[in-house]
Image (cartoon, coloured by chain):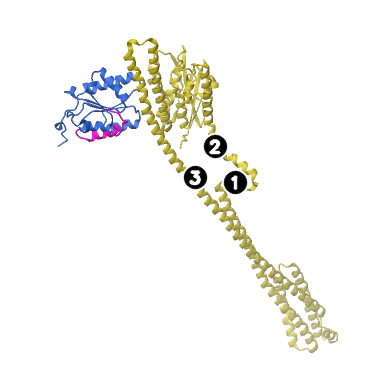
Chain colours: A yellow, B blue
Amino acid sequence: MKSCCVRIPHDKHSAVMACHLAMESATHQQSESPAVATGEAKPSDIGPGSMSSTKGRVSWLEKLTIEQRILAGFSLVFVGILVVTGVSYHNTSIVLANSRLDGRSHDLLQLLSSIDVAMNEAEDAHRRYLVTGEMSYLESYKKVAEQKPTFAAYLRELTRGSTEQEQRVGVLDRMMDKQLSAESEAITLFEQGAFRSVKKMALEGAGRRELDVIHRLIAEMDSDERQAMNRRVADSAVGTRNTIVLLGIGAFLQLVLLTWVYYLIRHDITERRRVADELQRRGELLEAANKELEAFSYSVSHDLRAPLRHIDGYAALLRKTVEQSLNEKGARYLQTISDAAKQMGQLIDDLLVFSRMGRQEMLRANVNLEQLIKSILADLRLDLQGREILWTIAPLPEVKGDQAMLRQVFVNLLTNAIKFTDAKPKASIEIGVDRPSSSEIVIFVRDNGVGFNMEYASKLFGVFQRLHRADEFEGTGIGLANVRRIVHRHGGRTWAEGVPEKGATFFIALPTRSNEP
Amino acid sequence: MTAAKPIILAEDNPRDAELALAAMEEEHISDKVVLCHDGAEVLDYLYCRGQFKSRLRGNPAVIFLDLKMPKVNGLEVLRTIKADINLRPIPVVMLTSSREERDLAESYALGANAYVVKPVEFHKFLSAVKELGTFWGVINEPPPEGPQSVPLHS
């Protein structure tokens, strides 16, 4: 309401006041669009602030979206399960391998003691044969000699993989061969009748030395194998304990992680529910506010007009009643009363249209701008009578939007162009498309009229903002405000360029994709 | 016969009423005008109740109806008139300040015969009221009176 004062600055004082008010409304305007930007900037403003105040790890977590956090949680659980499974498998397979090795060790120990016994027996048997010549002893010896390759092969098999034992098996094998061959040599000598030379052997034993080595080797192997077995038992015990501990810790960690993920999801759901509730509440408030606004504008349209009609009506009745005695001054006063009432009526009407533009539902369709301009010019032909205007209209595209609203936009822009080129002997008005882009269509209306100073460009689209005195050009100053409001509702932008006395260009940019919810 | 039929002007605002009467006076039809100050009075007139108990029987030539009135508003009066088989033929002209689409749509839906927005400028208001008064009060032939005119009524 106070911006009404801007329009008719008569004396110096009111001009200053008007300027002040105009600046005020200009700042209001400017704050209109950056408000969106600050609104968007807010969360990121908070982000770095908390980052510096808390640990880096937390801010790293905070940067993640809820989905990423949940995914991270589940991934960690998955990785944990993999690790626990892998390590358990490894440990268990070691225990299994150990128990297999244990079986082999038991076999080896048994074999070693059998060999020990067998070699003793061979020694015994050949000596007894040498002494007695009894054939049954020879048979016993031969049996051991026959068994020997089997023993050796079995030994190799049972010690495969353990280099130390394999080496010993090599030596043992050789010693056994040596013992047996020494003994069989002695037997051969005996059979050829060399009793004397054999006698000593029979007492001492032909392979006595080798047998001692064999005993020693077998004892070493036995003790080694027993040690290895003890080691493996201890290993298996440790492995089993580790597995149990790992399973316990893993289960605990997974429980913690899953609890965390559950908390995240629950927190998110609660948050979403809260936001939804809040949105619904605001929606209801907005609806109530809209209803109130509608009632208000209804009341304005009905109640504010009545007193205006009365002012004009009674002024007319007064004029009629005192017509004879009315002097020129009195007549002018009465005329001013009527004019003021009419002007206010016009302002109310314009304001109502403006308000309706803001809340009216939009009907989106393809709008053929070329046809739209044609029909507007046809409607304006009365205003164009007696005017010589050079029209330049470029091929115009189809746009998405509300036909009636867009019509209002171009009616305002074209009547402005026609109005402000009134004083020009050769008026020219151009409508064209500027800056082809994939995201928006920019259409301009250019005239060579009175133009404007770019200093005031920001005020152009304000409600009831006028850059010209009321006696220069008629109008209430609502037209461009309507243009901006409609274009904004289409998700577009408006701006203007001008040079005083040279002309003005008004741009509207409409998005190619409609993005109004 | 038509000259005798009154014109009902339903207007709660005395200034609007005075201005309208001033306009009718210029056309010399103001003596036919019956002024009602709210919707209830209009209905009282039509049903010959209250202060109109002893009026001459017969329907008016036309009713000029304001929308926003105390007690019973214009739309309610209109609904009552158009729902009553005897009153339905009376031409009803909405004469209002409201330019709201909602009011327009509802008025016509209820069966209003015309809808006129009171112009703010007096000379336009004057000519509008004059034309309305002359057309509906003088030029237009009102529906005949009595039940025989309504064949639907048994």
Q: Could you say where residue A15 lies in the image, as x and y percent from the top left? A: 52, 19
Pointer 2 indicates a residue of which chain?
Answer: A
Q: Can you tell which quarter of the image residue A228 is in?
A: bottom right
Give me the disc on residue A292.
none
Instruction: Please say if the residues under marks 3 and 2 sit with CB atoms less than 8 Å apart.
Output: no
Q: Is residue B97 magenta?
A: no
Q: Can you tell which quarter of the image residue A231 is in?
A: bottom right
Pointer 1 indicates a residue of which chain?
Answer: A
Q: Residues within 10 Å of mark 3 (few under 14, many from 20)?
A: few
Q: Could you say where residue A173 lies in the image, as x and y percent from the top left? A: 76, 74
- Quadrant of the frame with the C terminus of chain B: top left
Residue found at x 34% / y 19%: A314
Q: Nearer the viewer, mark 1 or mark 3?
A: 3
- Residue A445 seen from this side: no
Question: Label 2 amino acid?
Answer: Gly
Give me the disc on residue A275.
3
Pointer 3 indicates a residue of which chain?
Answer: A
Question: Label 3 amino acid?
Answer: Val
Is A297 on the left-hand or right-hand side of A246?
left
Q: Earlier in the sequence, mark 3 or mark 2?
A: 2
Question: Label 1 amino acid?
Answer: Glu
Is B61 on the left-hand or right-hand side of A485?
left
Label 2, label 1: how far apart the Cα atoms are: 20 Å
Quickly name the residue at label 2: A39
Quickly name the residue at label 1: A62
Q: Could you say where residue A166 lies in the image, as x and y percent from the top left? A: 74, 69
Q: What residue range appears in magenta?
A: B64-86
Residue found at x 65% / y 70%: A99
Provide the secondary structure element on which disc 3 rests.
helix
Q: Could you say where residue A303 lies in the image, as x and y percent from the top left? A: 36, 28
Provide the secondary structure element on which disc 1 rests.
helix
Q: Is residue B79 magenta?
A: yes
